[in-house]
Image (cartoon, helix red, strand yellow):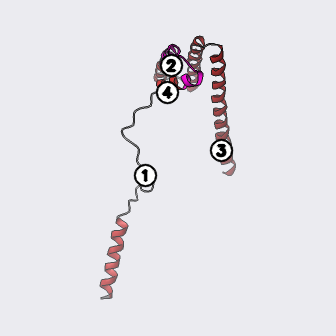
């Protein structure tokens, strides 16, 4: 009888253990799965909306800015296909960005130009802080090794 009880307990324990999914990234305890019906992110639309809000653009300016951003996106997509060194690609990305910003500045009035430059500086400051934190984290990791 003791042997039967021991075998029964082992069997129950094995069944309970088999119900746990031990694979990596199965979602158990991870949170909700990603939504499959999400729309793809529209960079052009989002950028246009942000600039319209930040700079108080009228409808004509917003339409022109949208076409400039679309042109910029096409330039970037064309650069992504090229097989050139990373440094050269970065320079071309920066040139395309500068070209887009120059075009955008040509449609803005004086107040909007000031707001645009302030907006750019805020973005640079945020990026600079993020880069600084990343560099500090890398230094700490190297020191701990």
N-terminal of the two: label 1 or label 3? 1
- Quadrant the N terminus occupies: bottom left
| Horizontal relation, residue 128 to residue 6: left or right | right
Number of other residues with Cα within 10 Å of mark 2, as a class: few under 14, some 14 to 19, many 20 or more: many
Comparing 47 with 95, the one in front is 47
Residue at image position (42%, 56%) is 28
Separation of residues labelled 2 and 3 (CA atoms): 34 Å
Number of other residues with Cα within 10 Å of mark 1, as a class: few under 14, some 14 to 19, many 20 or more: few
| Horizontal relation, residue 120 to residue 6: left or right | right
Vertical relation: 116 (above or below) 25: above
Comparing 14 with 52, the one in front is 52
Residue at image position (64%, 36%) is 131
N-terminal of the two: label 4 or label 3? 4
Question: Label 4 near label 2: C-beta < 8 Å?
Answer: no
Which percent across, then down, holds residue 99?
A: 57, 15
| Horizontal relation, residue 84 to residue 133: left or right | left
In this figure, which residue is indicated by the disc labeled 3?
137
Q: For the residue labelled by badge 4, is the local secondary structure a helix, a strand or a loop?
A: helix
Which percent across, then down, holds residue 61?
A: 53, 14
**Res 98 → quadrant:** top right
Number of other residues with Cα within 10 Å of mark 3, as a class: few under 14, some 14 to 19, many 20 or more: few
**Res 114 → quadrant:** top right
Separation of residues labelled 1 and 3 (CA atoms): 26 Å
In this figure, which residue is indicated by the disc labeled 2?
69
Which percent across, then down, holds residue 88?
A: 57, 21
């Amino acid at each position: 009888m003791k042997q039967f009880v021991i075998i029964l307990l082992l069997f129950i324990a094995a069944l309970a253990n088999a119900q746990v999914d031990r694979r990596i990234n199965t979602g158990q305890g991870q949170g909700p799965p990603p939504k499959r019906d999400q729309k793809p992110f529209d960079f052009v639309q989002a950028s246009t909306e942000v600039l319209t809000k930040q700079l108080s653009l009228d409808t004509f300016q917003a339409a022109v800015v949208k076409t400039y951003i679309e042109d910029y996106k096409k330039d970037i997509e064309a650069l992504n296909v090229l097989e050139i060194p990373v440094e050269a690609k970065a320079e071309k990305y920066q040139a395309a960005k500068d070209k887009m910003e120059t075009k955008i500045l040509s449609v803005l009035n004086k107040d909007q130009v000031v707001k645009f430059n302030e907006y750019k500086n805020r973005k640079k400051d945020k990026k600079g802080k993020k880069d600084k934190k990343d560099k500090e984290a890398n230094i700490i990791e190297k020191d701990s090794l």
